[in-house]
Image: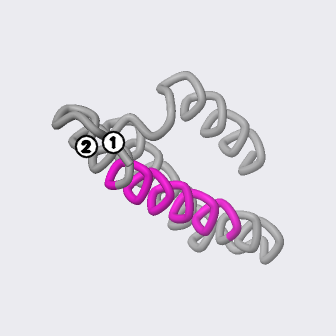
């Protein structure tokens, strides 16, 4: 356990940040799975909805600092190529 006040604070911050990061990572994984299912179904409306959901969740994750902007951009580029 931390002995200094600042170390205790950092420990608490680390735990809460870990919770937020894992929550967003789970959302990203789920939305990517939904997108893959939409691609398999070959329904245009469902694919567009799933893609916009992935885009939205990744943008929020970038904003929170969970993933980097480059990672999100690369993933979205690969996903948009799958739509074509």
State whether residue 64 is above or below residue 24.
above
Graded by Cα atoms within 10 Å as few (under 14), some (14 to 19) or many (20 or more), the crowding at tag 2 reads: few
Q: Earlier in the sequence, mark 1 or mark 2?
A: 1
Q: Which mark is residue 52?
A: none
Which image quarter is the C terminus in? top right
Q: Residue furthest right?
A: 40
Answer with the quarter of the image where residue 50 lies: bottom right
Q: Which residue lies under the disc numbered 1? A: 2
Magenta stretch contains residue 30: yes
Instruction: Give x and y (percent) for residue 17.
Output: 36, 48
Q: Nearer the viewer, residue 75 or 79?
A: 75
State the residue at coordinates (32%, 37%): 63
Q: Nearer the viewer, residue 15 or 46?
A: 15
Disc 1 from disc 2: Cα separation: 5 Å
Along the horizontal axis of the image, is 34 left or right of 59? right
The magenta segment is 16-33
Graded by Cα atoms within 10 Å as few (under 14), some (14 to 19) or many (20 or more), the crowding at tag 1 reads: few
Circles 1 and 2, Cβ within 8 Å, touching? The answer is yes
Q: How many marks?
A: 2
Q: Which residue lies under the disc numbered 2? A: 8
State the residue at coordinates (32%, 54%): 16
Instruction: Give x and y (percent) for residue 29.
Output: 63, 61
Name the main secondary structure of what is drawn in magenta.
Answer: helix
Q: Nearer the viewer, residue 18 or 36?
A: 18
State whether residue 33 is above or below residue 6.
below
Magenta stretch contains residue 24: yes
Q: Residue furthest left?
A: 5
Question: What secondary structure is found at the residue carrying circle 1?
Answer: loop
Instruction: Give x and y (percent) for residue 19.
Output: 41, 59
């Amino acid at each position: 356990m931390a002995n200094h006040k600042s170390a205790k604070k950092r420990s608490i911050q680390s735990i809460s940040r870990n919770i937020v990061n894992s929550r967003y990572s789970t959302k990203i994984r789920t939305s990517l799975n939904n997108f893959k299912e939409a691609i398999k179904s070959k329904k245009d409306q469902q694919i567009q909805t799933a893609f916009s959901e992935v885009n939205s969740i990744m943008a929020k994750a970038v904003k929170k600092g969970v993933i980097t902007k480059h990672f999100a951009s690369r993933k979205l580029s690969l996903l948009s190529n799958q739509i074509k």
